[in-house]
Amino acid sequence: MNAPFDGQVNASAPSDGAASEPRTLAVISAGTSDPSTTTMLAMRVADKAAALAAQSGTELQIRVIDLRALAGDITTALVSQHVSPELQSASDILRDADALVVSTPVYKAGPSGLFTSFFQVLDNDLLIGTPVALAATAGSARHALVVDDQLRGLFAYLRTVTVPTSLFAAPDDWTSADFGKRIERAATELVALVTSGFRAAVRGEAWASYQHSYGSAGGAEIGIDLDSDLMRLATGGR
């Protein structure tokens, strides 16, 4: 997970008249219950995106990452920088994905710690230019602004491109006639970014113009020489 990413991607925009190659849509859910409304919301977006992509002749293959199953691995990576094979596999899925649907429950007016911790241990360059649909669930509509207020900032830091439509589901939204329309709108925006070849273009010719910092975002302390003259001076030592 900490290996430098060189910007090379598997998928490219299809040429005029050519059949498009299958694309991958990664679904990341931080839902902790079973069944989980957080996962249900993410899958509704992913399924709608796959159906819309199929209408335009693009096959969108869905890969699901259940963060509940990776909770221990994520914690270990945060505190010891050890990356398990399972966590590395999840990172590889994101590295190769043409788009993401991310979904988190809201706890105490913010995304879950499991959700944010997962993205904090990823390589800083892993998701540059990747289209992302943002979603969250909560027990009250009071938390509806969490997606725009907090998730957009996180994914802006990761240099992704988030779709304009945010998705939030409180209990009443599941029976709302407008809820399905919002899901379709977000899925339409996501598919438009995927089929336009935006990610491939950014990671091709424009890759060198980005500032790159290798290593996991969660490893901010890595690379600091605590035994240097400067650090000894800063900590009052000799």
Image (cartoon, rainbow, N blue to C red):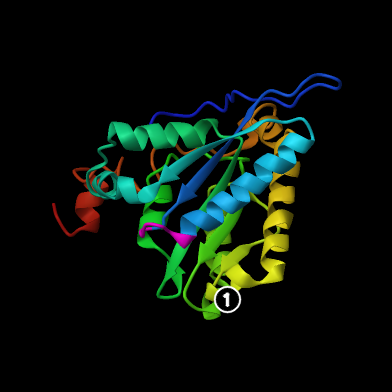
In reply to whether residue 228 is colored magenta, the answer given is: no
Number of marks in picture: 1
Quadrant for residue 201, please give it: top right
Q: Position of residue 19 (x, y in %)?
A: 77, 21
Q: Name the foreground residue: 116 vs 194.
A: 194
According to the image, label 1 marks what residue?
Answer: 172
Q: Quick check: 10 above or below 163?
A: above
Quadrant for residue 223, please give it: top left
Q: Quick check: 107 above or below 158?
A: below
Q: Which residues are magenta?
A: 32-37
Q: Position of residue 200 (x, y in %)?
A: 67, 30
Q: Position of residue 17 (x, y in %)?
A: 86, 20
Q: Quick check: can you spot residue 196?
A: no
| Residue at 53% over, 70% down | 146
The residue lying furthest to the right in this view is 17
| Residue at 72% over, 31% down | 58
| Residue at 41% over, 37% down | 90
Left or right: residue 206 compared with residue 86: right
- At mark 1, the secondary structure is helix
Q: Quick check: can you spot residue 58?
A: yes
Left or right: residue 108 compared with residue 145: left
